[in-house]
Amino acid sequence: MKKLLPLLTLGLGLIACSEQKSAQVESQQAEKPPVAQTQTVNIYSYRQPFLIEPILEAFTAETGIKTNVVFAKKGLIERLKREGEHTEADIVLTSNLSALLQLQEEALTQKIVSAEVEQNVPNQFRDEHGQWIALTKRTRSIYSAKTLGDLSNINYEDLADPKYKGQICTRSGKHPYNLGLVASMIAHNGVEQTQAWLEGVKANLARKPQGNDRAQVKAIKEGLCTLSLGNSYYLGKMVMDTEQKAWADAVNINFPNQSSRGTHINVSGVVLTKHAKNQDAAIKLIEFLTQNKAQQIYASVNMEYPVKQGVALSELVASWGTFKEDKIAIDKISQYRSDALKLLDQVQFDL
């Protein structure tokens, strides 16, 4: 028994030492700060990868916040609605105002609260309730065959002049780009005058509305018409396309109503989803999209006009010259979209 006592004492000492070391390790681990989890923003995007991916790469490089994107030409709003509170989407990037308004009307958005966004984006390009903001601007221009000479003084109202009978090409009147233009005409001229205008434009069409904006410029090149409606950035896209450059070379881009209210503007934009799980990171991305770096990418890659003032245009877009833009708030134009749809149906514009 006496021989066992030293061994027992030694064993107890070893156990005590081990427990002491274990307590020290636990104490040291408790003192270490928690490892920060990588932030992520999940995005539904109607805008194409070639434009959005460079912007998101710049955002991640600057902030460390990762992004996941689902790209689609259609169906994202329906998907977001179907997913409800279980959606992973934090923001939705749209290519037109109609999608922004639909997201808002379907109660799929929440208020974007950011002093920086308010500073970077002019009031007329933000929803008054903060449910969406515009990110880029485009003009709804009139393209004219170069054979017509200088039409820089042309107005939208002139498209109804009988002298242009059989000379106008356009896509569907109900497309968001044309629908916005018709709504702006109602905002400025009233329903009756806009109806008469639509009837006049329809009487001057060279063919039934069809195709996209570029298809109308192609039709001018082929001699099917001499005038068309089209977004400004499509001219840049055609100039950069080997096959389509000949179409672009056949037309002049005109900014209508320079002696009166100015040229109609349509927009792309972004919303913060109602059930966003990563709100803080999503707001940081929205803010980044309104900053100089992202706005410059929009301008250089897709030939759009930055919504933030003071950001340089692409060299090509700058070559088209300066113009006066219609200062009517996008919110006000949106109030007349249902009236615009009714008028387009009433005059059977697309038939």
Image (cartoon, grey):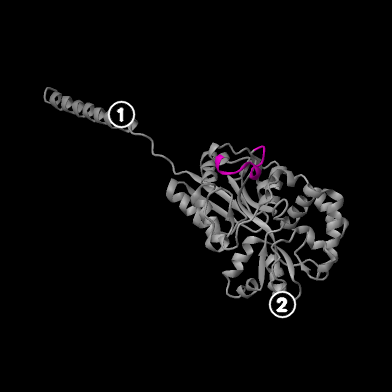
Quadrant location, the C terminus: bottom right
Provide the residue designation for mark 2. 222
Provide the residue designation for mark 1. 27
What span is colored magenta in the figure?
119-129
State the SS at label 1: helix
236 or 165, nearer to the observer = 165
> Would you place residue 200 above or below residue 291 in this image?
below
**Which one is earlier in the sequence, the residue at label 2 or at label 1?**
1
Quarter of the view holding residue 217: bottom right
Image position, residue 64 (x, y; %): 43, 46
Image position, residue 271 (x, y; %): 62, 45
Q: Which mark is residue 284?
A: none
Q: Residue at x 27, y 29 (%)?
A: 24
* Tag 1: amino acid: Ser
> Would you place residue 47 above or below residue 237 in this image?
above
Q: In the current view of this chain or complex, which residue is farthest to the left?
A: 3
Judge left or right: residue 294 versus residue 204: left
Q: Residue at x 57, y 61 (%)?
A: 317
256 or 224, nearer to the observer = 256
Observer-side mark, 2 or 1, equals 2
Report if the CB atoms under discs 2 and 1 are less than 8 Å apart: no
Image position, residue 77 (x, y; %): 67, 50
